[in-house]
Image (spheres, helix red, strand yellow):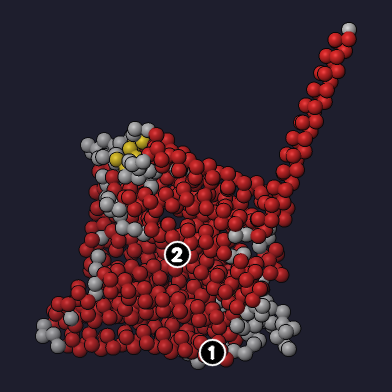
Amino acid sequence: MAEGNCTQVTEFSLTGFTEDLVTQITLFLMFLLTYLVTILGNLGMIMLIRASPQLQSPMYYFLGNLAFVDLCSSTVITPKMLVDFVSEKKGIAYAGCVAQVFTFDLFGMTECFLLAVMACDRYVAICHPLVYSLVMSPRCCFQLVTGSYLMGLTNGVGQTISLSSLSFCSSNVIDLFFCDISPLVSLSTSDKTLSHIILRTSASLLGVSSSLVVLVSYLAIISTILSISSAEGKRKAFSTCTSHLTTVSIFYGTSCFMYLKPSSDSTREDKWSAMLYTVVTPMLNPLIYSLRNKEVKEALRRLIKRLLRAGARRMAGGNCSSVTEFVLLGFTNLQELLFVIFSLMYITTLVGNLGMIFLIKTNPQLHVPMYFFLSHLSFLDVCYSSSITPKLLSGLLAERNIISFSGCITQFFFYGVFGTTEAVLLAVMAYDRYVAIREPLHYLTTISHEFCLQLVVGSYTAGILNTLVHTSALLQLSFCGPNLVNHFYCEIPPLLLVSSSDTRLNKVVLFVCVGFIATTSLLVIVVSYTCILLSTWSFPSVKGRHKALSTCTPHLVAVALFYGSVAFLYFHPFSRQAGDQGKTASIFYTVVTPMLNPFIYSLRNKEVRSTLRRATNKFLPCVCSHRSCSNQTKADTTQHSGVSRRNEAGT
């Protein structure tokens, strides 16, 4: 009865560290510098591992994933904290708070298991060095990393489920600088038994099991090191573990102090321990591994020398004669048939997407945020299909499909902008569906027109920034050799294959940027639909569940088509033999998907179908009346000419 009259809070207020203006500015500058060091350090570690052949071993494969997890976990917390330092209102929406809890717990538990996996790796390397390469095979390493992410995902989903079952009717003030599960449970006005059980179970099963793996591994390592006869051998064996031991000590020390210390009234200690755990630790990890690891320092030294030599060669110019145009090999068989097929598909793409935009703009019943985003999705489909397909069609009819160097860069830029923008916009549309189903009474106030514009502008900004990074990296390459591009348009992977420069850094930039955008967008989509499923599960009627989920099916189909083809296109290994498979995936990504999107939303959406039916019924009578008027005019003209001829005959 009490919860029946509960007015659920829609946002939480974060107290932060202090209200003093000078202290806030000081902390803002300090944490901003810390976050920049975190980004540069972890991204630099990932790029160094990917670009250095001597670091292609299981230990550094795990270290690259650890750097990625540190980067993501810090990004979940620090940007919001920095914004609150310069804002008067330190608030966060309920959905944003749930998303922050989910992603923070996901990456936190993933790092916990990654550290345990790295301890097992050190155990096999020191205790069983002869079978190290057999035991820690690439397949085994991939399975261990995937298992770590699955454990983190399980923890994040469990905490999100426990949080969604709570009611918040009284205070909405969180005495911390981010949303964590413990202060949220203490704020709840409903029964907290289930939340406490899930929190303690995940902490005991997942956290204790990973720490036991670390402890047992190092006990075996110490036993093996003590059995080594020479002091130099002991020192060399133990030196490979010092970086990992330091990282484990910092991570588990701060997490234990944060979550396992007795509850007290000293919130200042809680905030500073949380700051060490969420902000400082991700910054220290790459510094620890770079300062205490000889292989990393040597690889960094070699990479700097190689970059300096490449810069010197570029300044000198050398004997390189840069190409001024590329020959796109495209498709060599059935060119006439492919021309007809792709022409029909492109015409269908233009008619379908432009028709969708016209239908949304001219019908007031579709002037809601969902269709505002859908109109921009159709616009993006038209644009990035138009950046590829016309050149593809002209190349099918030409003997040699030639494109200039500047035209190639321009084509890639526009294709990259619109493709990246669509990836981010699909995540925005998932969040829109979450608010519409989870908070239907506050939908139009939360997703206001101004907020819609901000989300769309942010999507386009992300697309432009991402493509500028890749275009700048592409312009640094030299193309002196063959100019035959085994593709039907200018894309990074086939262009890297024909470059005469060292392209390892470009591959790292491509992997990091595409991986970051795809991961963050997919995380938003997964979190949104997890919350949607939890909300619809509480609906009493089956019809209500079906009606709520039916508004999400077109978006889910569009997401599956888009991200499926993108994953195959960009995360497929670079090779010359994989060109035909890459072309097929690119056709599906650039030609087929833009054509299918308007059909998916029109055939699977009742509002669009009914609006289209009304527009058709309104248009047909106008056409029929126009034809009847024309026929009546012709009859009157015929009658008038007959009377005139009779009068002339009488005269």
Q: Is residue 224 left or right of residue 617?
A: left
Residue 101: x and y in percent read: 53, 76
Q: Which mark, residue 519? A: 2
Q: In this rendering, is residue 635 above or below 141?
A: above
Residue 360: x and y in percent read: 66, 51
Residue placed at 64% from the left, 87% from the top?
190
Q: In this rendering, is residue 132 above or below 192?
A: above
Q: In this rendering, is residue 130 above or below 87?
A: below
What amino acid is at disc 2? Thr
Secondary structure, mark 2, is: helix
Tell me if residue 2 can be seen: yes
Q: Is residue 625 left or right of residue 333?
A: right
What amino acid is at disc 1? His
Residue placed at 65% from the left, 83% from the top?
167
Pick out the residue farthest to the top. Answer: 651
Q: CA distance from mark 2 to mark 1?
A: 30 Å
Q: Is residue 387 left or right of residue 579?
A: right
Residue 499: x and y in percent read: 29, 45
Secondary structure, mark 1, is: helix
Residue 610 versus residue 197: which sits nearer the camera?
A: 610
Q: Which mark, residue 263? A: none
Find residue 569 and report its image quarter. bottom left
| Label 1 sits on residue | 196
Residue 11 versus residue 341: which sits nearer the camera?
A: 341
- Please give the count of numbered marks on the rendered protein: 2
Residue 396: x and y in percent read: 39, 37
Residue placed at 42% from the left, 88% from the top?
205
Q: Earlier in the sequence, mark 2 or mark 1?
A: 1
Looking at the rendered image, the quarter that the C terminus falls into is top right
Find residue 372 and report its image quarter. bottom right
Residue placed at 50% from the left, 57% from the top?
423
Tell me if residue 23 can be seen: no
